[in-house]
Image (cartoon, grey):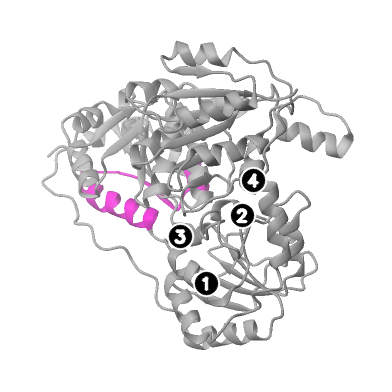
Amino acid sequence: MKASDLLVRSLEAEGVEHVFGVPGEELEDLMFSLRDSDITFIPTRHEQGAAFMANVHGRLTGNAGVCLGTLGPGATNLITGIADAQLDKSPVVAITGQGSRERLHKESHQALDIVNIFDPVVKWNTQITEAEVVPESVRKAFKLSELEKPGATHLEFPEDVATESYDSRPLPTRPRVRRPDPDMKSVRRAVELLKRSDSPMILAGNGAVRTRAAERLRALVQQTGMPVVATYMGKGAVSDRINCSLMTLDSGANDEASDAMSKADCVVSIGYDIAEHDPKSWNPDLDKRIIHIDSEPAEVYRHYNPDVELVADISATLRSLMAEIDGPLGPTWCKDYREPIMVDAYGLPDSDEPFSVKKTLPYLREAMGDHDILISDVGSHKMDIAQYFPTYEPGTCIISNGLASMGIAVPGGVAADMAVDANVVAATGDGGFMMNAAEIETAKRLGLGFTILLFNDNDYGLISKKQIESTSESFGTRLTNPDFKTLAESFGINGYRPESWDELEDLLKSVVPSDEMDLVEVPLPT
């Protein structure tokens, strides 16, 4: 068969149902091979949007999302979303077109060395140099992308290779490689360290959610009574309803969670990547004993130098710890911190209070079910969502905090609404929204129905805030925006701009469970 057909057959063998992307001339053969397959190609309005869609698909399902771009600018437009997937540990396979090999040794129209450009931001990538290597290349791309810790891989597909014929078939998939059980000697060292601690605390990271270890983690918390804080990407690993939860590292109006963390003498980090949250903030004096539980050894860093490293399957490690622990471990030392955190998170605004992200969140939480999905863009609103939005189930609050790239919310909403049977809310600021607002057309074309919650302060608000904190003034952050309600309606979706808290509360209760596309603008003080 033709190499482009073989590549698509190989994608089908991997279970791929959707490919997000922007077509190009050099992808012509691949495009028609996709047309004749069981895979749905979804044209997006920008390659970055396609990469973010693949990214969120991978993060929610655990199966690699696939995005597609042509050579040159098509490929470079993918890079931000690909890098975001890499640092957020989301499985993604990117495919890019390329010109014919006979012109790549010289300067040529749109030709760039994309493989070397991608190399620093992916786990693995290669150019498919001949039809014969298609099955192995595709299988390796998916295997490595989905292998813990997951990330991005990339395949470059020159247009002349796409037309070659080769008598082959896809490689069969195999069960994913499982990490081994932990070393029991290290498990017992960890347990002894915990028993000697007066104020132990669990730090739940991205890996606790990503590896589906939440159920086992919740059982450990119930058995030991240890308090838990989460990173932004670990939200939901432990339900914020339980008394042991102190939400995230920065939660509380007076930084109660951070204060509690400062008093912990032993930290059990579970699936924690230091790219999520700098350990210097919670271990500034290098005085905490640390137990590292993850699928890979800890990064070497002065402020994160574990006493014990349990490098194994996370769920298996937690099961082994539970078998060796014979009772509670300091369940009462942290109890006074939870109440003010919860009061702060659930506090409602006064009727004459101006709109704010923080005081919107209780109404949003009330409108959403436990298993509904909130996707946060990056900006000042992300900080409030991370700190004050109670999360009850793993994978239901999607925050990018590795690369932390703006623009993920709207395309992420597209992918989430396709991937899960739940209501989806994409929360964004005006800055991040305008970066990929065009993907509303993609959502409308696909017949999707989710809610865009847009906080508008006509500013790059987080940067402005940081500048003011540092210098008492800001520069280069102010923006002007279109009429967002009218913009939404021009896409053929519902647009709303509430004027009171009561109106906003009623509106969220109405639109979040609806099957329509809705945009709700919350105007913030400027």
Q: Position of residue 18 (x, y in %)?
A: 29, 37
Tell me if residue 412 can be seen.
no
In the rendered structure, find residue 149 and report the number of the disc placed on it.
3
Question: Residue drawn 15% across and 31% down?
Answer: 36
* C-alpha separation, residue under disc 3 versus residue under disc 4: 35 Å
Whether tag 2 and tag 4 are in contact, CB under 8 A, the answer is no
Position of residue 262 measured from the top left corner of the image (x, y, whole percent): 76, 65
Between circles 2 and 4, the one closer to the viewer is 4
Q: Residue at x 67, y 15 (%)?
A: 480
Q: Quadrant of the N terminus?
A: top left
Specify few, some or many for label 2: CA neighbours under 10 Å numbering under 14, 14-19, or 20 or more.
Answer: some
Depth check, front residue: 65 or 384: 384
In the image, which residues are magenta? 117-146
| Disc 2: which residue | 275
Q: CA distance from mark 2 to mark 3?
A: 13 Å
Query: Left of 442 or right of it: where is 295?
Result: right
The residue identified by callout 1 is 222
Q: Secondary structure at mark 2?
A: loop
